[in-house]
Amino acid sequence: MNAIDQARQMLVMASKDIKAMKSLLSPESADDEIFGFHAQQAVEKSLKAWIAVVGGSYGFVHDIHVLLLNLRELGCDISRFKNLLLLNVYAVRFRYEPQETPTNVLDRPEMLGKVVELYDHVLLAVNTAAEKSVDY
């Protein structure tokens, strides 16, 4: 599978997590751990798609911080997306532990907007790379 196909596959999976986020926008629909998990997953998959399309590799990493650093080392401007680091906790800690107190209540509409912004940015990068790779 080439890098563009790999990136597209990751974005398909990220879009499914975004779809789940949309269905969980109401706090009554699910706890923050569940919403946050899907947000983290969408970000992780989008970042991996971005890494693939710019020629990098990511291995079995699930840490948003590591993925963002990888992109920076590949020459990508990640400054707009550093605020997504707060989702790292939903990949590990809250995946198996309940959140006892709602001290870090997620602003779900705002977070959805940030995740979609990353997804759209990566989708544009993938589509641009695909156009450049087409032989005329």
Image: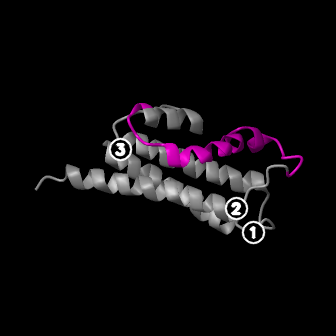
Q: Whole-percent x and y of residue 104?
A: 79, 50
Residue at figure coordinates x 58%, y 57% from the top left: 114
Which residue, given by chain and number where applicable, does mark 3 sit on?
53
Quarter of image, res 56: top left
SS assignment for the magenta stretch, majority: helix
**Residue 132, percent from left and from top:** 21, 51
Q: Is residue 90 magenta?
A: yes
In the rendered structure, the answer to whether residue 118 lies left or right of residue 25 reads left
- Whether 118 is drawn above or below 62: the answer is below
Residue for badge 2: 108
The quarter of the image holding the C terminus is: bottom left
Element type at mark 2: helix
Frontmost of labels 2 and 1 is 2
Alpha carbons under labels 2 and 1: distance apart: 8 Å
Q: Secondary structure at mark 3?
A: helix
Residue 26, label in figure: 1
Left or right of 41 on screen, residue 74: left
Disc 1 residue crowd, few under 14, some 14–19, many 20+, Cα 10 Å: few
Which amino acid, by three-letter code, is at mark 3?
A: Val
Q: Earlier in the sequence, mark 2 or mark 3?
A: 3
Asked whether residue 58 appears in the rendered view, the answer is: no
Q: Amino acid at mark 1?
A: Ser
**Whole-percent x, y for residue 1 in the image:** 33, 42
